[in-house]
Image (tube, grey):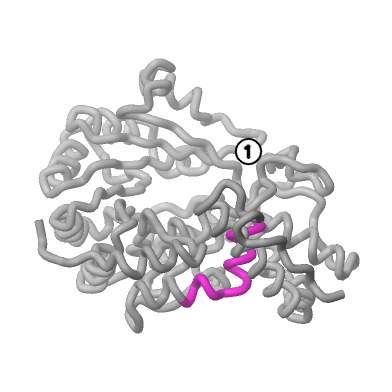
Amino acid sequence: MLEIEPNTDIANWLVTKGFDVPDALGLIVTYTCPLSCQSCGVNSGPKRTERMTREEILHYIDQAATFPTIKIIAFTGGEPFLLYDDLLVAIERARGYGLMTRIITAAKWATSYEVAYEMLDKLVKVGLDEINYSYDDYHARFVTIDQIKFAYEAAKALGLRIGFAVTVDLASQVTPKTLAVALGITQEQLNQGNQVYMVNHPLVPVGRGRSVPERRLMYAEDMIAGESGKYRGGCPIARLEPSVRPGGGLQACCSVGGSKDDYLVMGNLLENSLEKVLTDGNDDLMLTWISREGPYAIADYVRSKDPTVPLRDRYVNLCHLCHEINHNSQALAVIRENAQEIAARLSIRRTLQVADKRNPHPLKVMGPAPQLDN
């Protein structure tokens, strides 16, 4: 194990303040990708050149090791395997700190079982724990099912935990079910979830995804305006699973819009420490609102202040709604005009949430919540 002392004081301080503390750190090591999927919200592709240097990747891992709540480093892109030699060094560094590691990849590099096994074997030997494959109708235009089979079989033989991320719409031919059948994965294996699992995500119409016809979008029924459902409430990811983008910006989540979503950036890890950036990010009005009450509550608030703000009646998921609000100039104007009222509202909510963590009857300890001035 490498010698570095986790700073438990800052993590504990953030928790007692009701702040969000991360349990994972994503590293978007490059926006370059051999694929140009129509579904890609971050616009990765062969013409993108932004990437992290090896020194920067190691710096971020060193920073993560100082924060005791972070247990996993996830390498994503673009295509992380384009930085294969850097991955070997980075995963070994993370393993030295006792951190788990995961790679998210499209597996175009898996040109045969032998190639896939050799590449994954080297990664496993330096400490890789999990590999996630992205495959769906959009990826299938660039990657064959045989390549996915090679990558899957090699990972299984090496004992890696394997995940599949499938982007779906109403016209999808590739779904978790059809992919499982093609790979010979049984329902029992998926139910156990010990070595292999699958998740599906609706296509979000941002980035190149905007070019997907409206008729194909898979809207969540309980996102319809005026109805309550699982999408109401605070975002379950914001600030809990932040990601570093090329250039050092630490964004609150993986971000469906990539480098276009500057509102998600809490600070820069090439300029400040992780603990400072996370502390500053927990004081950010918009990020706190997203985390505490969620995009749906923000949309309701904006509509209550100005019904003329052009917002859709439904969205494919929280990420879609969050992106739309933060790229809507009229919505942002409403938020700026009412910033003080929103800040007071969030401060009250934070106080009550902290009490919930300490005592099952927070109002008996904290007293009744104060009322906002009319």
The residue depicted at 50 percent of the width and 53 percent of the height is 358
In-front residue for pair 94/78: 94
In the picture provided, is 253 more to the left or to the right than 93? right
Q: Residue at x 20, y 73 (%)?
A: 55
Residue at figure coordinates x 65%, y 47% from the top left: 317
* Dominant secondary structure (helix, strand or loop) of the stretch shown in magenta: helix
Closest to the observer: 239 or 265?
239
Residue 11 falls in which quadrant of the image? bottom left
Rendering coords of residue 12 (x, y %):
37, 63
- Give the image location of residue 213, x and y in percent: 70, 47
* Residue 256 locus on image (x, y percent): 55, 57
Q: Amino acid at mark 1?
A: Asp
Determine whether, in the image, residue 92 is placed left or right of residue 38: left
Q: Nearer the viewer, residue 257 or 330?
A: 330
Q: Nearer the viewer, residue 342 or 142?
A: 342
Q: SS class of the residue under badge 1?
A: loop
Q: Vertical placement of 305 versus 203: above or below?
A: below
Please say whether residue 291 is one of the residues in the magenta stretch: yes
As drawn, the residue found furthest toward the bottom would be 271
Residue range of the region highlighted in magenta in the rendering: 280-294
Return the residue at label 1: 169
Q: Does residue 198 show up?
A: yes
